[in-house]
Image: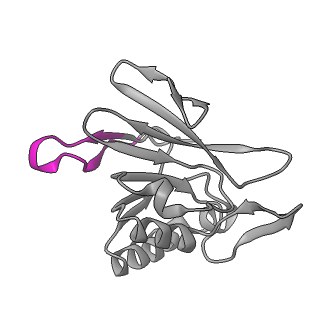
Amino acid sequence: MLENGELSPVFGELRVLPFAVEHSLRSPMLGLRISDTVDSFVYLPDVANLADPRKNLLGASLYIADGTTFGNELTRTEAGASCGHASIIRQLVWAARANVRQIFFTHCGTGILADVLRAERTLKGLAARLGLHAAFARDGMELVRGAGPESGVFKQVETCQVIA
């Protein structure tokens, strides 16, 4: 199936729509909108900028986002394009403006990993101010979508912890 001239694979009831994001000239990145007949979520593990965040996120119930940095933008401009990683704060604003209420951050940077509990408290506080639920993803985390009145709500059902 083609969408705007791009391949959009279908797997059973799941449709995967790739879209361009600004991340790096050397390592280009695609965002993915994964949808079924009921809902969709957006996966952007590496992103410096979205030309139209509202368009890319609108209608999704979940955003799996780039958790590289909290407040400091790790972006630069190369050949007129944004490269690097948008801050968590910037992505929370994108989600709020597009009415995406749940965000899980992955690809977390060293500043977050240095004090995960503090980072989680900060993230939850910032997200709450915007009317969002946000958390950091964990290795082995599984999310399931609710049914009935909780349709479109993703819940963490299991977290595997790595013990060294």
Q: As drawn, which residue projects farthest toward the front?
A: 5
* Above or below for 76 versus 160: below
Which residue occupies 71% across, 55% down? Answer: 22
Examine the image and state in which quarter residue 121 appears.
bottom left
**What is the magenta range?**
143-159
Examine the image and state in which quarter residue 144 appears.
top left
Q: As drawn, which residue projects farthest toward the bottom?
A: 129
Which residue occupies 42% across, 29% down? Answer: 15
Which residue occupies 84% across, 50% down? Answer: 25
Q: As drawn, which residue projects farthest toward the left?
A: 149
The one of 34 and 161 positioned closer to us in this rendering? 34
Q: Position of residue 41 (x, y in %)?
A: 40, 45
Q: Position of residue 124 (x, y in %)?
A: 39, 72
Image position of 100 (left or right of 123): left
* Above or below for 71 versus 12: below
* Above or below for 134 versus 1: below
Q: In the image, is residue 78 part of the stretch drawn in magenta?
A: no
The one of 68 and 60 positioned closer to us in this rendering? 60
The one of 30 and 134 positioned closer to us in this rendering? 30
Examine the image and state in which quarter residue 23 appears.
bottom right
- Quadrant including the C terminus: top right
